[in-house]
Image (spheres, rainbow, N blue to C red):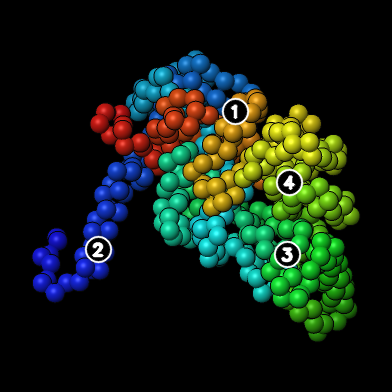
């Protein structure tokens, strides 16, 4: 109930009230809730009549997807819809897997503002966990980041520490549903975030690293310290068999975190730009035999694409999609690397490019010549494979999580809209335009 305004209420209070009402009206226009969800666990949902792009090598011009218990029960163009299923006619629409951003800082603050992704008191912070910084709704000025991302078809994001430090900490993979990070998180730790190149903040402090070689040294030092810690743990285990009173080495969270990398339990993801930093990352990969290496940004990757392909190094392209070579010739980076045999994903680096614009990033690559199927894979199945989650998400196949988007038209025509978004078989977003029509 709205009470009458008191005569002495200030204009500031009035403004706050009006602003709150505007926000409530805005939220009422966006359907982002479980109200449209299948609450009964055994309910079958049938999406019928749409063109389906599976990102799994087989597409359907007019197909059916059956959803049961949060998973895809059947998919194809000859699927029999069982009696009692809730049928949603999506004829004339397009269905794709839910989009996956392979590199995001969602829920950590606005780019260029105060953010929660860089602990700038120490250049080496592998012990930090990004899940302890993520705000599960979003951080101002956009407090609806997660909602807006889902409304543009993004269902999963790999959320990472920033690049201010040499070793920034441990990343996480979130599905964009739920009220807490714990509900959203489907993989943690996902990989170890590192960043090469000069570190301006530490240069200003007169503290290592002040050069690129100092940055690489700190990575090597952290790896070697992890090795010494492993030896100390092994020595303790041997001594304990002889002497029950033996004392273990003191817990060291830094070394324990780096031990995950050293023992190939955790992949590595490195922020790089120019070719020299890219090759430093490749050398570190060879030297320490990382479980898997992926590079973020890597704007000069076209100069060393053959080396990346040979060393099985993945590149997560973005937010800059187009670069120019030394002769000022345009390079469509994602497309160029794919054609050279490099495994490629496309990202926003949100909030550099805001999270809802993931498909716009891929659309830029398509505009300049990338095959649409490859672009689709770069924002669906490829990020899933990069994170080792392709058995669950990233493509529309029987048995996988029912994370999918119903679009009004061509995915890479940014004028088209997401009409319905499902995560784990639950309809978490419905376009307001559909509210005027029946299911």
Looking at the image, which residue is at 76% across and 76% down? 206
Tell me whether the residue at label 4 lies in contact with that at label 1, contact meaning CB atoms closer than 8 angstroms: no
Tell me whether the residue at label 2 lies in contact with that at label 1, contact meaning CB atoms closer than 8 angstroms: no
Q: Is residue 317 left or right of residue 360?
A: right
- Which mark, residue 367? 1
Whether 46 is drawn above or below 230: the answer is above
**Upstream in sequence: badge 3 or badge 2:** 2
Tell me whether the residue at label 3 lies in contact with that at label 4, contact meaning CB atoms closer than 8 angstroms: no
* Disc 2/disc 1 C-alpha distance (Å): 44 Å
Residue 157 at x, y percent in the picture: 56, 47
User: Which residue was labeled with disc 3?
Assistant: 199
**Upstream in sequence: badge 2 or badge 1:** 2
Label 3 environment density (alpha carbons within 10 Å; few <14, some 14–19, many ≥20): many
User: Which residue was labeled with disc 4?
Assistant: 298
Q: Nearer the viewer, residue 247 or 417?
A: 417
**Upstream in sequence: badge 3 or badge 1:** 3
């Amino acid at each position: 109930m709205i009470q009458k305004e008191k005569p002495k209420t200030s204009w500031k209070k009035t403004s706050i009230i009006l602003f709150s009402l505007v926000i409530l009206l805005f939220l009422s226009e966006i359907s982002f809730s479980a109200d449209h969800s299948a609450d009964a666990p055994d309910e079958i949902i049938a999406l019928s009549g749409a063109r389906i792009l599976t990102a799994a090598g087989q597409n359907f011009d007019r197909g059916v997807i059956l959803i049961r218990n949060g998973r895809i029960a059947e998919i194809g163009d000859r699927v029999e819809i069982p009696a009692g299923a809730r049928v949603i006619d999506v004829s004339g629409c397009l269905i794709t897997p839910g989009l996956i951003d392979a590199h995001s800082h969602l829920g950590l603050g606005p780019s260029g503002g105060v953010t929660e992704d860089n602990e700038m008191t120490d250049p080496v912070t592998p012990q930090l966990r990004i899940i302890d910084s993520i705000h599960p709704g979003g951080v101002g000025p956009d407090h609806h980041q997660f909602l807006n991302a889902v409304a543009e078809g993004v269902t999963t994001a790999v959320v990472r520490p920033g690049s201010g430090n040499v070793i920034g900490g441990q990343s996480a993979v979130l599905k964009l549903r739920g009220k807490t990070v714990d509900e959203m998180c489907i993989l943690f730790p996902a990989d170890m975030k590192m960043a090469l190149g000069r570190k301006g903040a530490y240069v200003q402090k007169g503290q290592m690293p002040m050069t690129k070689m100092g940055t690489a040294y700190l990575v090597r030092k952290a790896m070697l310290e992890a090795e010494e810690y492993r030896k100390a743990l092994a020595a303790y285990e041997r001594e304990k068999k002889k002497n029950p009173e033996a004392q273990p080495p003191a817990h060291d969270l830094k070394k324990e975190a780096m031990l995950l990398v050293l023992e190939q339990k955790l992949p590595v993801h490195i922020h790089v730009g120019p070719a020299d930093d890219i090759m430093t990352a490749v050398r570190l990969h060879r030297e320490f035999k990382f479980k898997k290496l992926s590079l973020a940004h890597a704007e000069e990757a076209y100069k060393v694409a053959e080396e990346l392909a040979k060393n099985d190094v993945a590149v997560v392209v973005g937010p800059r999609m187009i670069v120019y070579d030394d002769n000022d010739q345009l390079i469509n980076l994602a497309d160029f690397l794919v054609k050279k045999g490099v495994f490629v994903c496309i990202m926003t680096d949100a909030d550099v490019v805001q999270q809802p614009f993931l498909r716009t990033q891929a659309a830029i690559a398509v505009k300049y010549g990338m095959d649409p199927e490859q672009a689709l894979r770069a924002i669906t199945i490829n990020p899933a494979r990069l994170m080792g989650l392709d058995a669950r998400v990233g493509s529309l196949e029987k048995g996988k999580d029912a994370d999918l988007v119903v679009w009004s038209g061509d995915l890479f025509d940014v004028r088209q809209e997401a009409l319905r978004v499902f995560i784990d078989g639950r309809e978490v977003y419905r376009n307001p335009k559909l509210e005027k029509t029946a299911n």
